[in-house]
Image (cartoon, rainbow, N blue to C red):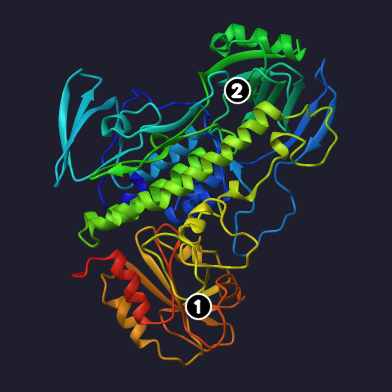
Amino acid sequence: MALCLAKNGVNARVLDKEDTFHTGSRGFGIQPRTFELMKILGIVDDVQKLATPIPTMQAYKLPGGTVPAKTWDLYEKTGIVWPDSPYANGACLSQSVLESIIRKHLNRYNITVELGQELVGFEQTEDAVSATILDHKTGKTYEIVTDYLVGADGAKGSTRKLLGLTFEGETKDTDGMVWGDVEIKGLGSDVFFFFDRPNCQFYAFRSTGIFGASRVISRNSFQFNVFQNFDHLIRIMARPLRPDGQEFGIGITGLNFDPGDLADEAKAKDFIREHTGRTDLEFGKFSWLSYFRPNMRMVNKFGENRVFVVGDAAHVHSPTGGQGMNTSAQDSSNLGWKLALVLKNLAPRTILSSFNVERLPVVAQMLHATSALYTHVVREVKDEATNKKEDENASGWFRWRNTALEMYGVNYRFSPIVVEERDTTAQDQENMMARAYQGYEGTGTLRAGDRAPEAPGLVHAGTETSLFSLFQPSMHTVLIFPPTDHASLDDIFATTSAYPKSTIQTFAVYKASASVQGTADLVDRQGDAYSSYLVANGKTTIVVVRPDGFIGAIVHDDRGLTRYFNHVFLQSV
């Protein structure tokens, strides 16, 4: 959120009640759509330098745990990268490393995260928010008067509670999870390790090096996860967290144990050795160890007046599916550009209400999907070592694949601020909201509110580029697809140029056969832009891409453009 605001020229103060930055791997999965948002924000190169592919999964027979019984992949390794989707698969990066990357980029805007500063109260007026902050170093409180307050302070944060929002959903009181990063000797770094035993717990080990640790401490570190339920099996998974294959994430779930006891390092080590039969494993230090019960909850609304919540402050769920950090990123990118325009007096405050309208259905459906996946994983999953079926529904968590989890389908077709003129088919609002998360894959459609596809192989001013390289977090991007090479676009350019230059960039996109030399021209050399945006011959098509990488409008003329921008900008701009 802070980086999005900074990219929009808005100065933000970032307060963190913690006294130190955490070092645990925590949420580590990055979905393909999130890479696209990172590209727009300008951090994807730094992230990809440290992020790593998800390794092949391998289940081992018990007792003993040394003989592989089954091997499979979470993602199909086809090697195919489609032009409209350049990030083919998800990847892994420890949350602490990702946060350090974001802090580095914030520093370029002279924004630092202020540690030990806790929000303990606030009051709102029509014009401002007065926040009361407790300084942990001095033990004293002080006041900050600000235009807006955004709580990204997690499930246990104070913003949601102080705002009086409800947190609707359920807590799995009979289940539990213990997560940790730990050094272990005796495992390699080339696969995810699974150890299953019916009617007990689930152990998960994963090496921290493979998942973006920024340094190598030793050759023996792992992340440790414990999932407790009282229904089915014992499973141990080892996920490599470092390239040297010695730091792992480990997890346990199953029957007849108290995960709270495993918050003790010595008990955790003994428990794992006992239930895996791997007495040869040598445990080093735990760099992180945490226990909680699964919560599947979300707020009734994302804000009120001048105070908003994003991320875990607004929704929490099981880690299954790897949606947490990714959903949080979409929350922030959705609110960020709107809030920036309002703060710069370019947009009406009413546009902020679209944040709640757009995100609420997406998150509600995401929670439903991840809750169902959690049930499949923890309560219904079969023993991987003995299950020979290839049916994804029968063969466990890491064979469960759904393109919805990649988040390409997230859309805002139902939003009151998008304008669709190309597809005039009547659409039911409730039906569109019901597909806000899963989307419309396989329908061959592209409408306003959908994710804006990539198109590589473009030529601009003699230089090769792509749409994702042109998209900016502070600007709308207007793409004009003319019906002919010589069609007049004067009215369209006149409309976009009437708005501040810092808010809109406009390009005319021509086919490879065109002979054009304008500074606002793009030549679609490979035809991917025309193909991805489903542009038909013979009619002007104008696509407006929002700063968050979603299509705000698909229209045919300057009147359609004006209709869309009237939703976004103040009439006096």
Q: Residue furthest bottom?
A: 486
Q: Residue at x 22, y 58 (%)?
A: 344
Locate residue 391 relative to residue 518 in the image: left or right.
right
Which mark is on residue 77?
A: none
Q: Quadrant of residue 312?
A: top left
In this view of the protein, which residue sits in the foreground, 103 or 86? 86
Q: Picture coordinates of residue 282 (x, y %)?
A: 69, 13
Q: Is residue 338 left or right of residue 129?
A: right
Q: To which residue does mark 2 refer?
A: 225
- The amino acid type found where label 2 is placed reads Asn
Residue drawn at 73 percent across, 27 percent down? 193
x, y (%) of residue 560? 37, 77
Q: Secondary structure at mark 2?
A: strand
Q: Nearer the viewer, residue 111 or 25?
A: 25
Q: Which quadrant, please, contains the C terminus?
A: bottom left
Q: Residue at x 66, y 40 (%)?
A: 54
Mark 1 or mark 2, whichever is nearer to me: 2
| Residue 457: % across, % down | 58, 71
Residue 267 image position (x, y, % from top left): 61, 7
Marks 1 and 2, how far apart in space?
52 Å
Q: Which residue is mark 1?
A: 462
Vertical arrangement, residue 161 with respect to residue 14, above or below? above
Q: Quadrant of residue 350?
A: bottom left
Residue, x 26% and y 27% (percent of image)? 117
Instruction: Indicate the secondary structure of the residue bearing disc 1.
Output: loop
Residue 242 seen: no
Q: Is residue 382 visible?
A: yes
Q: Earlier in the sequence, mark 1 or mark 2?
A: 2
